[in-house]
Every structure is written in structure tokens, then in C-alpha cells.
Amino acid sequence: MAIEMLRMQNITKVYPNGFVANTDVSFSVDQGEIHALIGENGAGKTTLMKILFGMEDCQTGKIFIQGEESRFSSPLDAIAKGVGMVHQHFMLVPSLTVAENAVMGIEPLKNGIFDFEEAVRMTQAIADKYNFTIDVRAKIKDISVGRKQIVEILKVLIRGGKVLIMDEPTAVLTPQETDELFEQLKMLKEDGHSIIFISHKLEEVMRLCDRVTVLRRGKVVGSGDVSELDEVKLSRMMVGRDVILKIDKPLSEPDNILVEVKNLTHRSREGVLQLDNVTFNLRAGEVLGIAGVEGNGQSELCDVIAGISSYEGGSVSINGQTTMGMTVNQIRETGLAMIPEDRMKTGCSVDLSVKDNIMANRIFSKEFRKGLFLNRKKINTLVDRYIEKFQIACNNRNQLVRYLSGGNIQKVVVARELTSGANVIIANQPTRGIDVNTTEMIRKLLIEMTRENDMGVILVSADLNEILEVSDRLMVMWKGQIVAIFPQADEVDEETLGEYMLGLKRMPVEELEALI
Amino acid sequence: MIKKFLNNDKMSQARRVEIAFEVVRVIVAILLAYALALALLLIFSDDPAGTVRQFIIGPFTNLRRVGNIIEQAIPLMFTGLCMCFMYSVNEFNLAGEGAFIMGGCITSWIALSIPGGIIPSFLMIILLFLIAGMVGVAVASVPAVLKAKLNVNEIVSSLMMNKIMYYLSSFILFYYMRDTTIAMGGSWRLPNELKLPILIPRTNVHLGLILALIAVAVTVIVFYRTPFGGAIRIVGSNRFFAEYTGINVNKNLIAAQIVGGFLAGLGGCIEIFGMYTRYQWIIAAPTAGMDGILVAVLARRKPALIPVTALLLAYIRTGADVVNLSTEVPAEFIQVIQAIVILLVAAQMFLAKTRNKIIYKQAQDDLAKEEQPA
């Protein structure tokens, strides 16, 4: 009989804006168990974990650690009780070493001064114990994303953590790194640690976890042993209906060239080379996917094409017009629209209404003017039509965007960008962190746009499934360069893609030139 | 009425509670401030209840005092609107004060320099309004442009700008328009035919009131009905977003601050030609510019609420004057009470816990309702 490590009972959480994140949620984790917590985004997984980790308060409910009722008012309390969290976004100091980061807050002292050698010894001891291969003297900024995650795990273990909360740990990893992480998590499990694994990738849950709890709209809708479930059953629980994981798409018939990028070079403000001689074309009627581990120049490429950042070498032309020296607005007028990577920061303004957000990129357009003033009637009709067409769940067009869920905020962004009249769409992480239904809708829309309206789409995504499903053609970026181009995205398998993404392989220049 | 409001289906539950709560919160804050004042007065005054009564009811006891409230509110509306524009793009450009003083100073100087009769007075006053506005634009644009082009902190540069404007206006007064026949430091008498007409007999409420209300209406229209207003609201609420959607951030930032400066400069001119017979703002200059910040913050940066908060502030000020004249309570003490009232009204988080509790309860009720039919 398994020993219960942790139990959360009847948790209810309402945010100050009235959003009910959790309703009467109960779940438990046994010792030596990997327990998956899955659900669409906005289902309340992260909130529940924040409550467990003492980052959020809850209105009702109790938490028991090894049978003892505990109340955490801050992460420090939680850590003291052996609960540790590995955040989606790493909380590490880039300029310090692995060892210094690992012992941060519990620094060993010698004569009142930080004892670096002792820190190295402590970190190395833990790393050896669990068979983590990591250079503890390396600086965080020099190590890979996968290693950084190991450091986060080390941080928890070194504090004596018995329960690890992993918030979508594989989102930023390559397939190979994911495999490695899973091996290590299994080892921790065998050592008696409990792991809470938050994900919305069903395949990973099936591979790694022992038990699973499914949340939907803040409530537990199902739980059970993974061995008794399959992916189809799980996805039914998550969304309440069968999700089509495959997209049927009509054949792409690439046409004339819309975007021509030639020898594009760009450096960051610090002088780091971020785009290195990038050359490719986008044709009408195709979705061009850009795969790559995050931070290999994909986002910079989007920003440079859209005119947010300038470029120092090469050229970009959109619909035959070269964009050198143009403002963002001028570039948009050549026929470009962009769904930016960070919807909360650059994709919308949460303090403005749905209407204002949808109108943002056409506010100066003559079409919506009546004399000096805005043509409110026309605007209102248009916005209402988009709310209906894009199924934006809001009370009315004047509701502030901050009251909407993540998926609906993204629908606002998509509605604005896809209807701007542009024939080139840059979609940078268009479905990151949103629910399955909206994800499916956005993917279908992108494909539909290219097939029916003869538009071209550049799709950047960290989600391999998305890249492989939606793209017609596929490029891989590594360290600011294009290292592979596949003319048929659906013929690429994840393993091969992973090798290119990690820089283990690259296509010869002649081969790439032929595929541009 | 509140019940009906809370059951309005068009707004989300949380939003409704927030709005209803805002109203209640302001009222509670004012009551609490007066209660606190009463408690303090028990220590300092022989007749605390009487003093508080004077403070609250005093401003309404005769027409002249009611007139005082309105007169004081006129410049506050202009500088409040000025700050609405500054805040709309999230810039803390405080040059409204300098713009206000210079607007009054330069137009007085021009009015005194041009002999009467050359330009018809109706045309002249319109001309002066425009000049005052342009002076305001000049003053406010310095910190705005410095920030946009050289990233100079606009708070520092606008405060320095204000200092320069104080002394420049004194210089102009003393060297170019001082009436040497009077003991006080003031200019020659401003031409009588340029004085703004009085609207309400036996008070000083002048045409400026109507102009101020027009300015409020125009601002509301600009904010919510024009492309420019839409653009500055986007820039103000999220600059990165504005940049990504192709809105020229710097251009709109500067434009909004220039419009703000225009209103403050105009306000200065209207104040001089409405309330004064001579230009006499020396070192003891009016504080309307800085009070504009208060007015705009109390109005939650919403131009439509500016007349309300300008009147509220003017009412509190008038109450203080009444107490000062009719009781033995020192003027400084009245300032303290004013400050308490303003502080509590402006405190955004005041009673936030109670509000969250109500929202939580509402959400629970909603859930219960939702579950019943299922």
C-alpha cells in the first residue's frame, strides 16, 4: 500500500477579478509516484500548484503533507515542508554558476563569507547521487535550456524537497532533452520522491506518469491510473469531446513569391549575432514553418521582418517592396500582419476593450472615419461580426480584455491580424498556452487563409506537433542560421527534426539553396 | 437603483461589483475623513462640531461662496484636462503649471502692449486664447521632446521647466509691465474691454466656466471618438503593443502632451482675464497646475469626470476658506484635513479586501445557480 505524501482537499480559489480558478478540487500524490495534472489552459492547473507552493491564497480547502495539515503563506513555508517547484520560466541568475544558483538562499558560510568550494561540493554531491551530468562550475548563461532545468531541479533537491512540482517542463526542450529529463525523473521517483507533472501533452503523460488527474474549468473531471487509460479517453476528459489531433488539409499549391529574404543579418544591441545570413522565400498559398529550439533567432527573424528591429545586412522585400528603412506601419501597409509571440505584452492591451484591441491596427484607416471622427456604427458592426466569427467569449465588445481567458485574448489578436487585409501573416507561437479548442481553430484558420485567400503564412512554434501538422514547408533554425529546409513537412519525423534543431546535423549549402 | 444596476446582464459580475464599489468607496472615504477631522478638532477647537459644519455646509450658505466654488473649479478643469492628456500616454509631464502661468503672463503682456482699439476686443480675446495655448504648447513640448528624443526623465525636466517659467514670468512682470504707482507687485490694469463677462450676477463666475465645459466635451470627444484619441489610449495603455501594431509611439506621445500644454496655457489666460484686474502672479503663484494632478488622479484619468472632481476639490478649498475666516482654527490645520480627504479618495486599495470578498461571494452564488439546473 502506497504512502500518501500529499493531499489537497476541497480547494476553491476565486481571483479578485471574479475569475473562479478552482472549485472544490481534491487530489493526492503518493510517495514515489509521478502524478500528472492535465487539462486545457485556463483549467486551473497552474493556480492549484501556486496554492500548493504558497504563492496564492485560497478561499476554502486544506493541504495535508504526510497527513499533517499545513498552511503555506509563502513559498518559503512550502520549501520548509519539502515542496519544491520548477517553474515554466526559469528563475536563475544567468551571470552566476550552477552551484551558486543551486545554493541560493541557503548559502554555506565560512567565517561569515560565502564558501564557494563548499557550494560546489554540496551541488556535486546531489548531482552525483541522482546521476545528473552537469558542470557545477559553469555559468548559467553558458548552458543549454535542458541543463537549466536540471539546475532548477537541483535547487529543489538541495533543500531536501520531497515533492517536485514541474510546470510544463518539456515545453522548451528538444525531443532528446525530453527523453533525458524523463529518465532522471524516473530515477527520482524510484528514490521515493513524488512528482507532480503538469502538462497538456498526452503522449508524455502516457509515457511517464503513474496516475493522472484531469481538470476542466477549475474542477476535477476525472482521475485514474495511467495504465488503465489511453490518449483518446484522456483527451475526451480534457475537452469533453473528441479532439481531432490530426488536421486534414487540402494540398498546398505554392504560387508567386510574397516575401523574399536575402542574406539577412542582425545583431542584438549587445552585439550578439542573432540572424546569420538568412535566405528564404515565402510563396502565396503555403504555410512555411520555422522550427527550432527557442532562442535560435526565430523571434528575431519575425521582429526584423515586421520592422520592430532593424537589420544590418541583406534585404527583405514584401510583395515586391523592399522594407529597408520603413516604419512598422509602412511595412504593414505593404501587406504584412503579425501575431506576436507574447500576447499579453505585445499582442494586445489588457486595459482596453475588445473593440479597441481589434481596431488598433486600422484606427487611422479612412475606411472607419466619418469626417474627423470615427465611424462608430461601422466599427461596432464590424467588431460584433468578428466577435461572432472568431467565437470570442466576452460579454460585449466593450469588455476589457483583461477579463477574458488566455484563449479568448488570443482570438482577439487573431481576429485583428487575420482581417487586416494583409496577404502575409507572421504567426509567432500562435497557440502557446491556450486551450485545445482555440488551438485547433487557429491552426485551421491559418491553413484556410493560405488555401482560400492565397495568403502566405510564416509559422514559428515551439510545439513540434503544431509545426509538423500545420506547415507545408519546414525550415529549421539553429544559432541564427537556417540549417535545414524540408519541402514536405508531413514527411519529416520528430527524431530527424530534433537532430537538426540541436545542431547535430545540417544540410549542405547547395542543398539548401535548391530548396529556397 | 443599485440592485437594478447589479442585475444588469450586459456587464460581467466582477465589473459591476467594481463600479458599484467605487461609488460606495468614495462616499465612505469622505465620511471617514470628516469623522477623522472631527476627532482631531476635538483636541484643537472649542467648537469642533461647529467647525466641521462650517467646513461641510459653509460653502453653500450664500451665493458668493457657491460662486467661489465654481470660480475655483474653472482653472482646475483646464489643468485637470491637461493632466488627463499627460496621463493618457503615461507620461508624468508636470509642465502644466509652467504652461498655466506663462499662458497668463504672456497674454497679459500682449494685452498691455497693444493699444486699445486697434483690434476689436472680441477678436483680440480669441487671439489671446490662441497665443496662450501656443505658449502652453511651447512649455509642455520641451520635456516631451527631451524625453522622446534623448530619454530625459520628464518629471525632472518638467519641474525644472516650471521653475524657469516662475522666474521668467516674474522677470517679464517686473521689467516690462509693472505698475510703479501701486505698492503691490502687479502689472498695469488690464484693459476693461478684454475682461471676460460675468455669468452669474453678484459672483465672479465668468465666461470661463462655459469654455471649460466645452474643453471637457471636446476632450471626451477627442479621447473616444477620434483616431488620435484611440491611438494615444493604445500608446498609453501598452507602448509595446502600440509599436507592434504600427502606431508611431513617439509622435503620439508628443502630440498628446502638446494638446495638454495647450489646455493649461489657455486655462492660465482665462483665469487672468476672468478673475483679475492686473497680472499679479509673482512668487506666490497659483497652484492650479499642480492641483491639476490631483483633479486628474481623483477623476481616474477620465476626462468626463474632470468637472466633478474639480468642483469637489474647489468645494473642499472653499470650505477651508470659510473655516479660516469664521473660526479660530488655524489655516494650516484645515490644510491637514483637506489632505486627509484627498488621500482617502485617491487611495485605490482602500477597502479592496471587502470588495474582493463581495466578488468572491457573487462568484459562488453564480456557481450555485449554474449547477442547480444540471
Image (cartoon, helix red, strand yellow):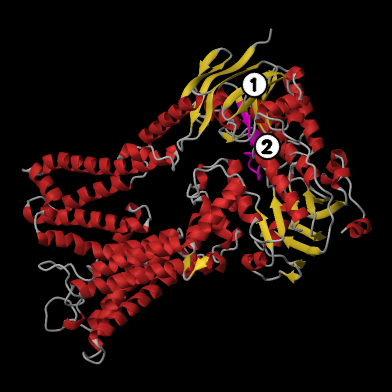
Residue B288 visible (yes or no): yes
Label 2 element class: helix
Residue drawn at 75 percent across, 67 percent down: A319
Label 1 element class: strand
Q: State the CA–CA distance, disc 2 to disc 1.
A: 17 Å
Observer-nearest residue: B125 or B290?
B125
The residue carrying mark 2 is A436
The magenta span reads A84-102
- The residue at the far top in this view is A1
Query: Is residue A31 covered in magenta?
Result: no
| Callout 2 crowding tier (Cα within 10 Å): few <14, some 14–19, many ≥20 | many
Left or right relative to B147: residue A202: right
Is A344 rendered above or below residue B106? above
For the C terminus of chain A, give its image quadrant.
Answer: bottom right
Residue drawn at 20 percent across, 73 percent down: B274
Residue B179 — which label? none
Q: Chain of mark 1?
A: A
Do callouts 2 and 1 point to residues on the same chain? Answer: yes
Observer-nearest residue: B281 or B348?
B348
